[in-house]
Each structure stands twice: as structure tokens, then as C-alpha cells.
Image: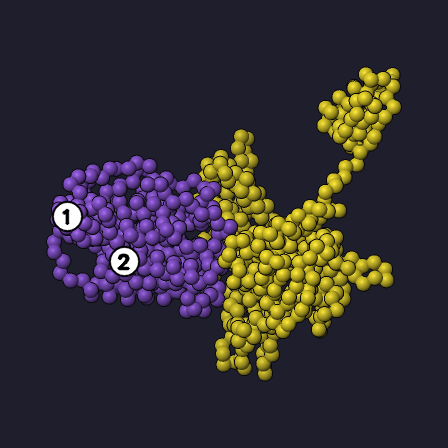
Chain colours: A yellow, B purple
Amino acid sequence: MPRVKIIAKNFMDMVASLPAIKLDMLYRNQFICEAILRSLPPLAKKYVLQMLYIDAPITCKSLQEWVLADGFSKHNVAIDRLVQLRVFEVTDRKKETTYKLNPTFQTSLRKHLIHGGILPREPMSPNVIAKLPTSEELDAYALEQWECFLLQLISSGQAEKSSSFGSSMMRIFQRGLLRQREKEAPRLTDCGFQFLLMDTNAQLWHVIREYISNSEEQGVDQADLIAFLLELSFHTTSEAYNLDTLTDDQTAMIKDLADLGLVKLQKGSKESWFIPTKLATNLSVSLADTTSRKQGFVVVETNFRIYAYSSSKLHCEILRLFSRVEYQLPNLIVGAITKESLYNAFDNGITAEQIVTFLQQNAHPRVAEKVPSVPENVSDQIRLWESDLKRVEMTPAHFYDEFHSRDVFEAASDFARIHSDLLWEDAKKMHMVVRAEINTLMLEHLHGKNR
Amino acid sequence: MASAPSKLYADDVNLVVVLLDTNPFFWSSSSLSFSQSLSHVLAFFNAILTLNQLNQVVVIATGYNSCDYIFDSASDLNRSYENGRMPVMSSSLLQKLEEFLIKDEQLSKEEPDGRIKSSLFSGSLSMALCHIQRVFRSGALHPHPRILCLQGSPDGPEQYVAIMNAIFSAQRSEVPIDSCYIGAQNSAFLQQASYITGGVHHKPQNLDGLFQYLMTIFATDLHSRSFIHLPKPVGVDFRASCFCHKNTIDMGYICCVCLSIFCKQHKKCSTCGGCAGQKKRGQMCDCRLEILHLSP
């Protein structure tokens, strides 16, 4: 089954697929340039900054000279990304290609570095606002909203209240993640399982991407929404911003973002405002491929027991995916990794690598500093159990026997060997097994021999 | 002496501690004025903070008599300026710099003539290392630290011991020290510091383009350093200063026990104690050891 990898990069691919005119308009905004810069791989960031004040185009060869031999693959990845996002303009002359920074991008970034940028809205003064939630209350609110949304997304019965997303919207989000057969409850696909094991920001970007692609179908401009989202990540958490400063499209989007936990909406006597949460301001951290940095909660012991210091239902559901949850205390989930629970997970399409990565990335701070954070015997055993299921490798093939003569047999086996499709042969009995791809060619070859 | 191998980092989050030379004796005679270089350097700080949301910049000013913290991007005061405006452009950095310069000048006493007008590099290097130690102890999720020295003043041989100690502790903690020397002659201390800790040393040819040098060489994060061509050390000046007079020497006497360097034979080693003539701790050898110029 083809495996679709859901990663945060999908959002940048969507940005890159915008038409050139719209991208240029986006690049006039300094904050979008900064967000895009932050989403690039580290080498690409370096190239952009080095070429920021160079107006003449630079040849491909000169760029390659900047890199050591080890880094060529990263160099190519970086250049591809830059060309894809139209940050680099390519001109192909007769013998060589040259690169130059996109002029709009260049001007915006230069201004940003020297003068800094000013957001289109200022936080409201404390006189007008009744009382702002503290940062802890805000974090708790964001977490609650996001978990509620996720639980509803995976159709778990555990969701306490449903978000205000319509059922059609939820179905769009669930596209690819859930599969429903007749008369059965909807089940998660293997992409759905992978989605659950990803970290929060990657999940958030996936949901936002689906949201924006859907809104395009309803006639709202994609570029505007993308610009607003990227700008949102530069606001200050715990500061209130007046809703009047938003356009109509943005106001509609804000209500949906509040359901996801990115902002908190509040009303005063005369005005209403929104407060960005940490989920929103951390958006630009995760656009790039770098490892996530957040505090974990899972302790894995060498006797295969798991202790998760969390009271969240979502975490419990995730742990149930691959371990047997034994007790649930007010602040602790106790479970064990067993062969049965892992076979269950593998059947659902989760790989051992994903499970081990999840445990490593969410390791409790107490064990996170130890190397390795997950004991080796546990990670090795998980991988061994996975390879148990893969002991037999299947290749579609065809079996040939009853050759007329030895010459024909040997010619046929040579023919197969040249194409490296010969899997097995028995010279005495003149039997041979050949890969399925070459079957038609083999039959033609034999017919040709017969004539 | 082999240079420290560079660690492999998974991501490009950096904490850059910048040691900014504010020695008035140097700046009054430099071709690039202090305010011009400050504009280059501030844009450089902005660029580092733009690269990654989690990057941090700490600035320590190296004065003639003292050194002090000027700016910390992670402090709460600067976070509140985050509403879109670049935090480094905030007036707090420039204000603190001015206060520091006034304080530094007031500490000046009558100096005996002939003393080299060097800045208090050893002090600021030690302060940087202490700050980095604090960052190390803040938990597993700290950004990867490195030190960048923007120096123009000549070396002061009386600071040799302190600087070498700081360099070795930086090597121990695997903190690279980059150095950008904008003065007239060469600085042996900076070359040694970068060589031993695995950092980059460069002396820009054209000071008008200081920003471009900073962006090309010194903005490289630790993760990318294994992939990018950076200036290699050409010939490092490994000359030492003697412990008694703080003069730079090529040949001298070394204590067998603690390896302190002296220019004349003493009866007693001042670092570890003990007398010559008795087979006790601190006995001085009679051999004169030549300190070789090592080439990498």
C-alpha cells in the first residue's frame, strides 16, 4: 500500500505552488519573508543571507565552491527548495546557470534587518480590557481546545464536547486519516496512526493545510489566509488585539482558529479582541525540518513498563495504540509494552521506528538527558518484533519447466540472468523461477527460440 | 596541539555570546568609526535573531578597565518589545552601551607609560564562559552556545595566563570561540583561541564590508560548519608570555611540576611553591627549553 507521509513541509509546498504574481505580493510583507526564511533548511538560510547585499547574479559553480564535499546533497536540496519557493531566480545561459535573489524578497528582507518590521496592529491598552488570562490559563485553554479537536477528529468517544466545526469540515480534516466501512465505526488508517504519533506542530500544519485548500474551493483567497497565518505567528502571546483590525475573511478564519486553540476570543463591553496562544506563536518554529523541542512526559523502563506523567485523554489514546495501558491515575498513566500490543500496532500500519521516535521525542526531562533516553533493550526488542513479521519476503514470480532441450533452458536462464531477474534455477530438472516483470519478454524470447 | 573536533548538532539553534571591543584607545585610531561598525554589528544581530525563533544573542562589552553585559535577547525586558519590531533596535542596547562607556572612563587611573593599550579581554571571556555554564545547567533544551570576539585592540601580555585558562576551559566545554580581528596587527591570543577550541579566525581585509564578512563567515551555525568552507588557520602564533614579567618570550625556563614559564631562572616556582636545590615539589630544572613555533 503506498504510504503517504504527512509532514509539515506540505504547507510550504502549498505556498510554493502559488502563482508567481501572488508569491511576489506575499513577499512584500516583511513578516512573511521572515517566516519563509525560517522554514528553509539551514544551508539555504545561509545562502540567502550571504546573497542579501549582492546584486549581480552568481554562477552555479561559485555557489558550489562554498560547500565542502560532504555537503553536496544538502546543497542540492537547499538550492531546489530556494528555486521552488521562487526566492532564487534562475537564469539559464548557454553554458551555465546563474542565481539571483528575488528582488522583492531581497528588498523586504533588507528593510527588515535594518529597520525591523511593524505589525499592522498594536496590542490594546490595559485600560480597555477587563482582565487578561494569565499565560498558564492561556496555555491550558490552548491545550484543551486542541485536544478536544483531535479527539473529535479521530472519532473517539472520549471527546467531552464537540467543537463548532461543522460535520462537513470534520470530514474534510479526516480525509486520508479515517476510513469508514458500512455498519462499522470509522477506523483510523495507517496514515491516521502516523498522524497521531507526529508532534503537535506538524499535526497543526496538516490541519491548517486542509483548511486552506478547502477555503480555496469556497472562493476565499489562499494567499490572504496564508499571509494572515504567518503574520499571526509574530504576534505576542498574552496580548490582546482588537478584532476590528481584521478583514472579513480574517474574522471568519479567527473563529475557526479559536476552535483549534490558536487564539482565544474575548468580549468586552464595547469591543472584542483575540489573544494569540503559544500554539500560534510557535508556528514558525516548526516550519523547518528541525527536531521538536518540547517537554516530554514518558518514562520507559528496562522492564518494558511505561509511566506517562500526563492526565490527557489524548496521550492515553496514543499510548493505547502500541502498549497495554494498565492503570490510569490522576496524574499518571501506567502501561506495558507487550508483544501483543506491538503486533496490534504493526497490523495497524505503525512502524517500529515511529514508535521509538515517539518515545524518544516525548521522553520525560528526567530521562531525556540520559543517552539513550529509551533503554536499548526496549528499542531493540521493538525492532526485532517488527522484523519477526517481515521474515518472509514476497516477490511475484513465474515458474518455468518442461523445457525441450538443455540449450533452450540455458539460453533462457542466461537471458533472465542478464536482466538480473533470475530468482532460482535447478539445472538438473531444468526448472526455473523468474521475476514477474520479465515474463512477457521471456515468453517472446522463448517463442523466438522455437522458430 | 590538535584543534577540538566539532560536535555534530541536529539543528541550527544557536546562542551567540558576542564580546564587543569598546576600547576608546583603539577606536580613536581605527579607520572604521565606532558608530559605523556598530551599525554593521546591529544588523548582524538582527540577522541571527531572524534565522531561527529560538536563537539568542548576548552582548558583553570589553572596555579598557572593565566589562559588562550590554544586551540579552532572552531577557523579559526585550521580549516585550517583540511586537513586530526587531528587539535589537530597541534603545535599551544603545543606552546600556553609553552608560557602560561612561563608567569605564571614570575607572581610568594614571597608567605608567609604555603599557600596551589593550582591552580587558580576559574579563569578558570569563564572563561569557560563566554565562554559558549557566545555560548548560538550565536543562536539556538549551541552544548550542558559541562565542564571537570582535576585537581590534592589541594583545596585552599581562592577560596571557587568564586568557589561556579561559581558552582551555572553553575547549573542555566544547564551546567554539570565533574571532574577527579588525585591528592593524595580528592578535596571537585570538588566533590561539580559535585554533584550540575549533572556531574560526578571520581578519577582514576591507572594513567597509564588515557586515558581509560577518554574514558569510560568522553567522554560520554550528550545525552547518561541517558542510561549508570556512577560513582555515594559516599560521598560528603560539608564543607564550612569561609568568613573572608578562613579556612575550621565545625561550625560557619551565617548572617541572606545574609547567609555568619563566624568563629567568628562579629558586622557587611562584605558582606551585618549593625550592631549588632540594628534591621537593617545585624544583626548577636547569634545562632551558625552547618554545617551538608549532605549525598546523
Q: Amino acid at mark 2?
A: Gly
Q: Quadrant of the C terminus of chain B?
A: top left
Classify 10 Å Cα crowding around label 2: few (below 14), some (14-19), many (20 and above): some
Q: Is residue A154 visible?
A: yes
Which percent across, then down, holds residue A363? Answer: 56, 60
Q: Which residue sits at x=24%, y=65%?
A: B102
Which percent across, then down, holds residue B111? Answer: 14, 58
Q: Secondary structure at mark 1?
A: loop
Subunit bearing disc 1: B
Q: Secondary structure at mark 2?
A: helix
Q: Is residue A258 above or below residue B52?
A: below
Left or right of B180 in this view: B250: left
Quadrant of residue B231 within the rendered picture? top left
Tell me the residue that label 1 is attached to: B278
Spot the residue most to the front: B279
Camera-side residue of A160 and A356: A356
Tell me the residue that label 2 is attached to: B123
Subunit bearing disc 2: B
Q: Is residue A18 visible?
A: no
Camera-side residue of B41 and B7: B7
Quadrant of residue A445 within the rendered picture? top right
Q: Which residue sits at x=23%, y=42%?
A: B239
Which percent across, then down, holds residue A402? Answer: 87, 23
Q: Is residue B44 above or below residue A365?
A: above
Circle 1/circle 2 CB separation < 8 Å: no
Q: Which residue sits at x=79%, y=19%?
A: A410
Q: Amino acid at mark 1?
A: Gln
Q: Quadrant of the N terminus of chain B?
A: top left
